[in-house]
Image: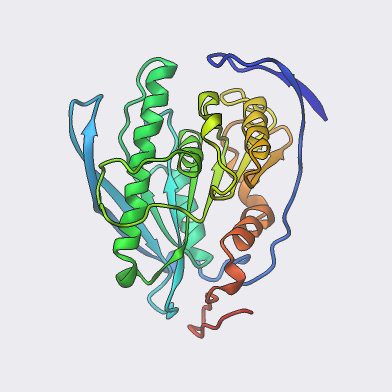
Amino acid sequence: MVRSSCWQGVTLACLSVAYAGQQFQCTGCFCKKTWDESTLQLQTDVEYGSAFNTHQKKTQTLLLDIYQPPKTDDRKLRPAMVVIHGGGWSSHNKSEYTFARTAQHLAAHGFVAVSIDYRLEGYGSAAVKEAANLDAMYDAKAAVRWLVKNSKELRIDVNRIGAFGGSAGACTVAYMVVEPGEGESGNPGFPSNITAGVSLSGMLWPDKYGDIKANQPPYIDFHGTADTKIPLLIAQETDAAMKKAKATSFLVTFEGETHVPFGALFNDNDDFYGYLTEYMSLNGAECPHADTQSHIVV
């Protein structure tokens, strides 16, 4: 199927776009849910940093919620995911239902997931939102550093830390993959690089295409073909810019779906967990087991 589309607020040509369907088959022990969500551990309102909020005109304490597998999970090292909510950089929070459910979904599959608050500064023009996107990235990178800092206590594999976001959170993930800079949101001295980025209804601002590098972390965007907030064309152009720079990038579409189609994303986990299995090398990680007997798949 081919459709022509434009996005108001960004100067781009209207182009015809072909849609790509499923690209991954998931194999391995992270593809299926290991634990029921009712058995997971949850710790809320954990401080991971602070930074000056340009909208509030004051320093904001940055908080996250930790979703972990049950206490019976005896693995020595576990992959982790930073979950970043949407809302146009001006609304929502770490407890927003669909993002909290995503963190639960990841924990039930064997991840340690943290859903984060970040500075909401995107009240105004596209330029204001783009600046807010950068500060959100700095906050999310501070959350990655917090995970590394606390990796011993949480038994986190520091070589398997990813980021997932939807809408504004998805754009923040794109920045984490592409943009340099650490910011000053907390936990200096620890690395903030991610292993892989996952976006739901995201894009990269066109003026950042020049920052894309071939050796950046792999990136995937899941996108509805009927998205009117961030139309598919923008996602297609982001993917094309990354591929042009020889970066690892994928675009998986959901026919007829609109903005942030969580139902479509998790209705069939193959692409989501298949991508993570391949690009976070999960087939070399300790497998989650409900009976507490962990082993390494080779």
- In the displayed image of the protein, which residue is found farthest to the bottom? 293
> x%, y% of residue 26?
69, 62
49 versus 243 height, above or below:
below
Q: Residue at x 63, y 41 (%)?
A: 222
Label total for image: 0
> x%, y% of residue 242?
62, 38
126 versus 282 height, above or below:
above
In the rendered view, does 176 fall on the left or right side of 48? right
Does residue 243 show up? yes
Q: Residue at x 37, y 72 (%)?
A: 155
Does residue 94 show up? no
Q: Nearer the viewer, residue 177 or 92?
A: 177
State the image quarter where residue 59 is shown.
top left
14 versus 68 height, above or below:
above
Q: Nearer the viewer, residue 111 or 249?
A: 249
Q: Residue at x 45, y 38 (%)?
A: 179
Q: Quadrant of the C terminus?
A: bottom right
> x%, y% of residue 138?
34, 40
- In the displayed image of the protein, which residue is found farthest to the left? 58
Q: Quadrant of the N terminus?
A: top right
Q: Residue at x 50, y 44 (%)?
A: 177
In the rendered view, does 47 fall on the left or right side of 27? left
162 versus 27 height, above or below:
above
